[in-house]
Image (tube, rainbow, N blue to C red):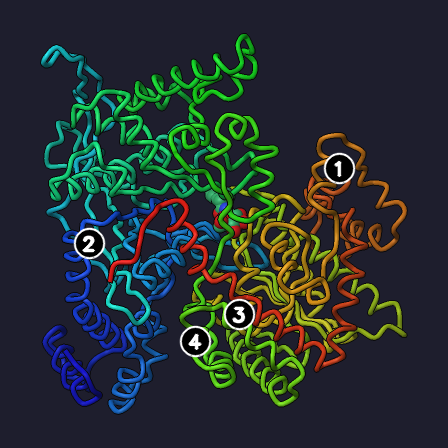
């Protein structure tokens, strides 16, 4: 299509004029962006077709990654880079007077996710394609991604996100592949050739329409597919209240995580989950059948991955397809189902473990419910043989109990592999949360420590550091990130360290500019950039961070001899709309920021910034500029964390608890290259089991704690009466569930060590270098290779 600058320019201009009927001189940035996007999509289409043909003709096993979230972010630069045409395009545009960076800014983030779970899915897709592995994503094409966050008067305000307002250049609508999804109605049994069969009657059907996105591997010819389903009214509906039916139908793919405090919201979420699963599985089975293979071998050629429990209905849906549509018997179908499916758990927090009331589930998905009943009955029978008479234990493990359908047990029982996402997390699953199932299926449990794609999180987002690395150790690390270890040879190389420091400084300046543009705050780029960016949740303890800032402020105000190394604390976080406490923490951060930033006694040494609307594209500017990475969850609560890996890869040092993947980070870099503090997971779990923690003791004996907690409620912050009572109560009247006060002293101390360490510049840079050098382990290529080898058993296809 184009192989040099001149050709690129000619095609670009022609396409722009043909598509928009406007001359280049008159065209808008958006038209230019869309032209470029369409060109790239056309550019990959032959590889895309070729990849699919190759997969079909070789007939090797393929994997489908089912996920309710895919947090892709922007794709333009990433696709150009992966295609290896970034330079041609950039220079070609330049000659036309267009800055590629300006066009990039036009693209809306595809923010179809909430946090780590969705971003992990996106990193995995990139690794699958880059490793030439036959693996595709299946998700939902939400009309609105995660809400857009505005901060008004310190409060989070949620606006509907509008990523599709101008269309999405990368997608292809495939309406011929649409699938009818039945809800409600009733199930009828009948006899066929002496066999008892079932059919679903009087259902209200919805049409699931697929939109395909190309997933382009890094400088390979592999182009996999992310298929996102959209819910549309069916042509076959018998519903006569058309307007209502249309509205109800479209609401299924309207937004991510609709509020499920009421039945209506629960129905909607369950519809989303079933739509995702049923449409994906039916399309997978129909493409398998085109290969003319027996369904009895299905599991040998297809793997289906359940990302967290949201797609766990894949278990009964695959059973339904195999039995009701393909005529297999229960035992055959069950064998195939279990051997096809695998499941990853991403959290042990009980509020995130999904359960659906049977009274809603049964009428909405009558046939699926029947199948779950049968799965449950057979599973309980098995348990009865293992634990005869122990009804209590059996009930605690059942899939159906206390009027609810429990999704995690359904996923475990129906999969041949169950994995956690970091070694500590997997141990906690095996020894505690899922111990009962581990006793029954020990061979199913395994660990797959998370990873991140270094192509987006280092090569694309930190080009300066990328160049320094390649200039120093050659380009081999790009293919295999373990080679980053070769950087260790430069530990004592002052010229290298100086350059490393200069690059960080340049990245800090870029971020400082963004901060100034977005919030009007001027930050000192010689100060330490100390960053906490992640979902807002009590267990992640943004509160500990902000209480520490209050303490620093108090100390600066009252202790004239105190010399604090200047620090800029940067936050980015969205709170779930219904999460009252999390929203109060956002308000507190902004209130403290306001006070600190406007106080001339301290604001030359202390600044606090809350960056609004944290999302993938903003994150790409934050990680390269960070020097301190805050990973301070209550030990045992963070399954893995992946932000921690992105910071590390960009040379930030971690201040963290021994939680999630911080454990592996510590093993890799050594305790001298990380700042650990706080309770260990075992201590937290023991407190939770046996009691013995009293937060008020810490209040009484530590004057620093007393002062900062009282300041929440004593008028210290003007015009905030009652504003922070819930936070105060959580700490002192509800015994501080997340051990914020227990870890406070230890956190203050480790932060002092950070300041101390930073004063020795070359020492600090050496630690930074060690972190980068050891971060290769956290490439999602390593993670995906482990999934491919040990769970999915898939091989590269070139
Ligand atoms: C939380 C919430 C909060 C309220 C609104 C709805 C909602 C939906 C999902 C979740 C959490 C889902 C699980 C999740 O994102 N887990 C994260 O998965 C990452 C990838 O494995 C892991 O690194 C993080 O530690 C884990 O928290």
Q: Please identify the quarter of the rendering in which residue 739 is found.
A: top right
Q: Secondary structure at mark 3?
A: helix
Q: Which quadrant of the rendered structure holds the N terminus?
A: bottom left
Q: CA distance from mark 3 to mark 2?
A: 38 Å
Mark 3 or mark 4, which is nearer the start of the sequence? 4
- SS under mark 2: helix
Q: Would you identify the image quadrant in which residue 375 lies?
A: top left
Q: In this view of the protein, which residue sits in the foreground, 733 or 4?
A: 4
Q: Is residue 67 left or right of residue 532?
A: left
Residue 297, placed above or below residue 613: above
In the depicted structure, whether residue 737 falls above or below residue 111:
above
The location of residue 656, given as percent across then percent down, is 67, 57
Q: In the rendering, at what x and y percent does residue 797 appear?
A: 25, 58
Q: Nearer the viewer, mark 4 or mark 1?
A: 4
Q: Is residue 167 visible in the rendered structure shown here?
A: no
Mark with earlier residue (2, 4)? 2
Q: Are marks 4 and 3 in contact (CB under 8 Å)?
A: no
Q: CA distance from mark 4 to mark 3?
A: 26 Å
**Cα distance, mark 4 to mark 1?**
52 Å
Relative height, residue 4 to residue 508 (above, below): below
Question: Whole-percent x and y of residue 404?
Answer: 44, 21
Sequence-wise, the earlier of marks 2 and 1 is 2
Q: Which residue position is annotated with label 4?
A: 476
Instruction: Determine which residue is flagged by label 2.
Output: 55
Q: Is residue 634 left or right of residue 169?
A: right
**Up-down relation of residue 164 to residue 331 (above or below):** below
Q: Nearer the viewer, mark 2 or mark 1?
A: 2
Task: Determine which residue is flagged by label 1.
Answer: 735
């Amino acid at each position: 299509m184009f192989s040099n600058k001149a050709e690129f320019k000619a095609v670009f201009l022609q396409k722009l004029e043909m598509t928009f009927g406007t001359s280049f001189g008159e065209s808008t940035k958006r038209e230019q962006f869309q032209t470029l996007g369409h060109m790239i999509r056309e550019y990959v289409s032959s590889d895309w077709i070729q990849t699919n043909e190759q997969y079909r003709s070789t007939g090797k096993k393929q994997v489908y990654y089912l996920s309710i979230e895919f947090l892709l972010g922007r794709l333009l630069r990433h696709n150009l880079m992966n295609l290896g045409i970034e330079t041609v395009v950039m220079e070609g545009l330049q000659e036309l007077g267009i800055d590629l960076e300006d066009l990039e800014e036009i693209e809306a983030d595809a923010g179809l996710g909430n946090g780590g779970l969705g971003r992990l899915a996106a990193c995995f897709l990139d690794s699958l394609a880059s490793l030439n592995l036959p693996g595709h994503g299946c998700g939902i094409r939400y009309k609105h991604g995660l809400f857009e966050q505005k901060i008004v008067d310190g409060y989070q305000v949620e606006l509907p996100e509008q990523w599709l307002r101008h269309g999405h250049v990368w997608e292809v609508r495939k309406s011929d592949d649409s699938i009818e999804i039945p809800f409600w109605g009733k199930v009828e049994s009948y006899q066929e050739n002496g066999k008892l069969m079932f059919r679903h009657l009087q259902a209200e059907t919805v049409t699931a329409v697929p939109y395909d996105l190309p997933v382009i591997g890094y400088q390979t010819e592999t182009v996999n597919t992310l298929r996102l389903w959209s819910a549309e009214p069916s042509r076959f509906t018998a519903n006569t209240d058309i307007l209502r039916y249309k509205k109800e139908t479209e609401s299924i793919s309207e937004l991510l995580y609709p509020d499920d405090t009421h039945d209506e919201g629960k129905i909607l979420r369950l519809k989303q989950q079933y739509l995702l699963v049923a449409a994906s599985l039916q399309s997978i089975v129909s493409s398998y059948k085109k290969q003319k293979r027996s369904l009895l071998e299905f599991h040998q050629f297809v793997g289906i991955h359940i990302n967290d429990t949201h797609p766990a209905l894949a278990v009964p849906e695959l059973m339904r397809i195999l039995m009701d549509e393909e005529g297999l018997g229960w035992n055959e179908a069950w064998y195939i189902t279990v051997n096809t499916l695998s499941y990853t758990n991403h959290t042990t927090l009980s509020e995130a473990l999904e359960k659906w009331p049977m009274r809603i589930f049964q009428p909405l998905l009558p046939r699926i419910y029947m199948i779950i009943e049968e799965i449950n009955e057979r599973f309980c029978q098995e348990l009865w043989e293992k634990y005869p008479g122990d009804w209590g234990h059996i009930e605690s493990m059942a899939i159906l109990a206390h009027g609810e359908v429990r999704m995690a047990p359904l996923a475990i029982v129906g999969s041949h592999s169950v994995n956690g996402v970091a070694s500590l997390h997997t141990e906690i699953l095996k020894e505690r949360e899922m111990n009962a199932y581990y006793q029954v299926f020990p061979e199913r449990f395994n660990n797959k420590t998370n990873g991140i794609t270094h192509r987006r999180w280092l090569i694309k987002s930190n080009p300066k550091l990328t160049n320094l690395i390649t200039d120093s150790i050659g380009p081999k690390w790009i293919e295999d990130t373990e080679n980053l270890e070769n950087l260790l040879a430069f530990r004592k190389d002052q010229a290298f360290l100086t350059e490393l420091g200069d690059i960080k400084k340049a990245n800090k300046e870029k971020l400082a500019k963004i901060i100034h543009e977005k919030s009007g705050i001027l930050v000192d780029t010689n100060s330490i950039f100390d960053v906490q960016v992640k979902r807002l949740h009590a267990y992640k303890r943004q509160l500990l961070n902000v209480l520490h800032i209050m303490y620093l402020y108090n100390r600066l105000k009252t202790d004239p001899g105190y010399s604090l190394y200047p620090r800029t604390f940067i936050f980015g976080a969205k709170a779930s709309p219904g999460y009252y406490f999390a929203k109060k923490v956002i308000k507190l951060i902004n209130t403290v920021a306001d006070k600190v930033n406007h106080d001339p006694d301290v604001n030359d040494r202390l600044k606090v910034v809350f960056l609004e609307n944290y999302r993938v594209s903003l994150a790409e500017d934050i990680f390269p500029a960070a020097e301190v990475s805050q990973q301070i969850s209550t030990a045992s609560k963070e399954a893995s964390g992946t932000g921690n890996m992105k910071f590390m890869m960009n040379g930030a040092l971690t201040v963290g608890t021994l939680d999630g993947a911080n454990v592996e980070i510590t093993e890799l870099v050594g305790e001298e290259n990380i700042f650990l503090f706080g309770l260990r997971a075992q201590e937290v779990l023991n407190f939770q089991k046996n009691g013995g923690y009293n937060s008020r003791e810490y209040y009484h004996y530590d004057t620093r704690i007393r002062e900062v907690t009282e300041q929440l409620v004593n008028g210290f912050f003007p015009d905030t009466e009652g504003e922070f009572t819930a936070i105060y109560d959580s700490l002192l009247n509800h015994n501080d569930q997340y051990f914020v006060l227990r870890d406070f002293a230890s956190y203050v101390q480790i932060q002092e060590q950070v300041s101390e360490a930073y004063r020795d510049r070359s020492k600090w840079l050496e630690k930074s270098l060690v972190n980068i050098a050891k971060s290769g382990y956290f490439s999602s290529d390593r993670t995906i290779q482990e999934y491919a080898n040990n769970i999915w058993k898939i091989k590269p296809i070139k």
